[in-house]
Amino acid sequence: MDILNALVTFLNFVFVPALAYGAQLALGALGATLIYGILRFSNFAHGDTMAFGTMTVILFTWGLQALGISFGPLPTALLALPFGIAVTAMLLLATDRGVYRYYRRVKAAPVILVMVSLGVMFIMNGIVRFIIGVGDVNFTDGERFIITAGQFREMTGLQEGLAIRMTQAVTVVVAVIAVALLFWFLQKTRTGKSMRAFSDNEDLALLSGINPDRVVAVTWIIAAALATTAGTLYGLDKSFKAFTYFQLLLPIFAAAIVGGLGSPIGAIAGGFVIAFSEVMVTYAWKKVITYIVPESMAPEGLVQLMSTDYKFAVSFAILIIVLLFMPTGLFKGKSV
Amino acid sequence: MSGAQMTAQASAQTPAKVAMMFAGVALLFVLTGMFQSWNLALAIVNMALISSIMALGVNMQWGYAGLFSVGTMGFVALGGLAVVLVSAAPVPGAWALGGPGIVMGLILGALTIAAAIFVWARMPRGRMRGFATAAVLLGGFFAFRAVFDPAVAAVEANNPATAGNLGGLGLPVLLAWPAGGLLAAAAAWAIGKTALGLRSDYLAIATLGIAEIIIAVMKNEDWLARGVKNVISLPRPVPYEVDMQQSAAFVDWATRWGFDPATASSIIVKLLYAALFLIVLLALIWLSETALKSPWGRMMRAIRDNEVSAAAMGKDVKRRHLQIFVLGSAVIGIAGAMMTTLDSQLTPGTYQPLRFTFLIWVMVIVGGSGNNWGSVLGGFLIWWLWVMVEPMGLWLIQMVTAPMAEGWLKTHLLDSAAHMRLMTMGIILLLVLRFSPRGLIPEK
């Protein structure tokens, strides 16, 4: 019984939150890695693209709520998601037309493009703050829990409860659908195949008649969809705050680099590696250990390796270790 | 800009043109003084001087050496930390409670890392090496926590409402400026040793992360500098306004010249600060200009423009990169210490990457990367804009919304005017990168 209690505690406080967070990071990292693969620069504006996308979703959610439309037990934001994606995609396409295209044409060094993305980051950050402000916005509605800790205890008769929040379940389901769609698109469709060809070898792809403008446009649209979805899921799970999204840049890039920049499957793996390490290193293990070991050996302290404030340090440490020992990441991304 | 594609454009500006640009920026400050207040103008000048020094440091790393490091904020904060450690008043009893334990813990931590590196370097390749290194790290970590945690708890329990930290040395605050440089340099050495081998994008992400970690440490390690509880009323190198206003001689002097004593005292304090900052700025410019003209400077630029051929000439690229990274970070650290001195308080919660990393980068790029005077011009121009865009944006929005009916939209627009500055900075950066990629004063 104690083993089961320990397992349930682990699931409740570590596995389920890390799974949801990992799915959010994976979607964010997928967007960053696609842009790196096709456009060949690290997009520092990605965190703020997520913020912008989430903001449009929030605005549409408010609009739907005002019209009295809801999604039953599910959050209304899911209904607003397609609209948010459309607006964000238009913004990214406009940014590409107005800003990035020139640098592609003059074949600027990647580092120049990174700086340009800094400028875009400033502007997007400004727009988001201008429209929705800097405060916390909570836009979750619908059912709060699929199963609460109390219900779980009644059902199983265990001492510990396992709560699964609706937003966590929604996150995982939506992420699985999004990733399945993306991989189907990249593997099976003509445009997806031309994108992979373009990422592998640009010159060869151009030679075989692939239209680069189309590839770039589709990449931005997919990046917008992934960023908006990732941002909305993160916002539903926690809350929306412009500055937090900017800070997500670090774990997202850590995930993309750990998996191998430019590799979609790597981005997903990287997202979960980062999320699980962050949660496991900053979780206080006292309760779990107390259930497993004999009573006399129960720990006195919290058995927390690091305080939660140092979660950045975890993603950063993993990033450095991978870069030093496996420079192309777990899944052989673009070489350094 | 680094790279050959940028150096081919537009020739260097003539000295007359450069002087014109500086005069133009100076005019902005004079106008601010005339139409708003000299107090405000001088306040902007002081932060502009500090920002220029930060920009000089970034310019060393990026302009001279092409290192894309966006960890500026971390070094600024370390400079600020040095002010507390060097010049804050000592906390009675704190050292006796946990000082030795904390120092021992930190030494243990450093020894663990050194031992792990030693094991990794000396053992033969293979699975055993990985396990041994991990075992050393894990064992060292628990030993570190066992020594460190009780000491920290003891220190933080000591009068937590007003202290709860180890306290400073109580030395004159001017000593904290070089100390800030040293602290930042030491951190930069450790960071450079691990991260400088990375290619541009990766280095950027890594340094961005390090800066966040430095801030996280300063926010959470209360024994160090009270964390988010802040350290206030740090000593200052100039007299206090209140003391001046209470001195009969000063009030006499001010009234004789027709000044209001309150305004005069605050202007004099700001002028004194400005003089101190100006001395540091000019000294640093003189040093870096001399260095840039020397064979060392030419070697740096050669490495930046073509690492492979510089290495073929026998230059140790890695060592030089580490050297310039440490030097640039030290300059940023000095500026960080100066800023905390000017504020007389250390508030770790206020360090934000947009303000302390990316804004400084905008200054360097707008001014002209690789050119020290460009960094100074960029520092003054961009800082002035950063401060003035807010009231200008508010005025603009008031003009636009004047005909609108009162309502939530009008209120919202007026409330949001403050965020115009981020957009303005982004637009300026994009325009400069697009139309004048070498900046206002290009590299010679």
Image (cartoon, rainbow, N blue to C red):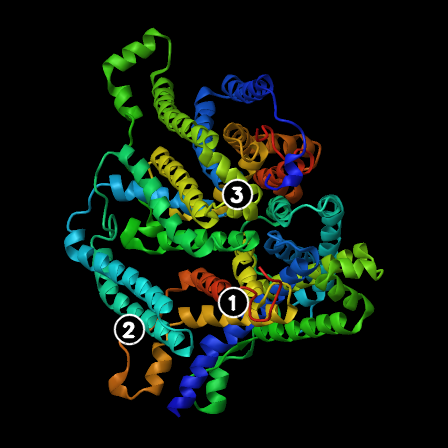
Residues behind callouts 1 and 2 on a single chain: yes
Residue A326 numbered mark, or none: 1
Callout in the foreground (3, 1): 3
Secondary structure beneath dot 2 equals loop
Mark 2 chain = A
Real-space Cα separation, disc 3 to disc 2, in angstroms: 52 Å
Which numbered disc flags the more N-terminal residue, 1 or 2?
A: 2
Mark 1 chain = A
What residue sits 76% from the left and 70% below the top? Answer: A185
**Can residue A66 be seen in this snapshot?**
no
Real-space Cα separation, disc 1 to disc 2, in angstroms: 35 Å
Q: Quadrant of the N terminus of chain A?
A: bottom left
In the rendered structure, which amino acid carries the disc numbered 2?
A: Gly
Q: Quadrant of the C terminus of chain A?
A: bottom right
Mark 3 chain = B
In the rendered structure, which amino acid carries the disc numbered 1?
A: Met
A117 or B374, nearer to the observer: B374
Taking the view exactly as shown, the residue that stands out farthest to the top is: B256
Residue B400: x and y, percent? Answer: 69, 33
Tell me, yes or no, whether the two marked residues, 1 and 2, touch with CB atoms within 8 Å: no
Secondary structure beneath dot 1 equals loop
What residue sits 69% from the left and 34% below the top? Answer: B435
Residue B306: x and y, percent? Answer: 57, 44
Residues behind callouts 3 and 1 on a single chain: no
A31 or B230, nearer to the observer: A31
10 Å neighbourhood of mark 3: few (<14), some, or many (≥20)?
A: many
Taking the view exactly as shown, the residue that stands out farthest to the front is: B313
Secondary structure beneath dot 3 equals helix
What residue sits 64% from the left and 63% below the top? Answer: A262
Query: Mark 2 highlights which residue?
Result: A301
Residue B303 numbered mark, or none: 3
Real-space Cα separation, disc 3 to disc 1, in angstroms: 26 Å
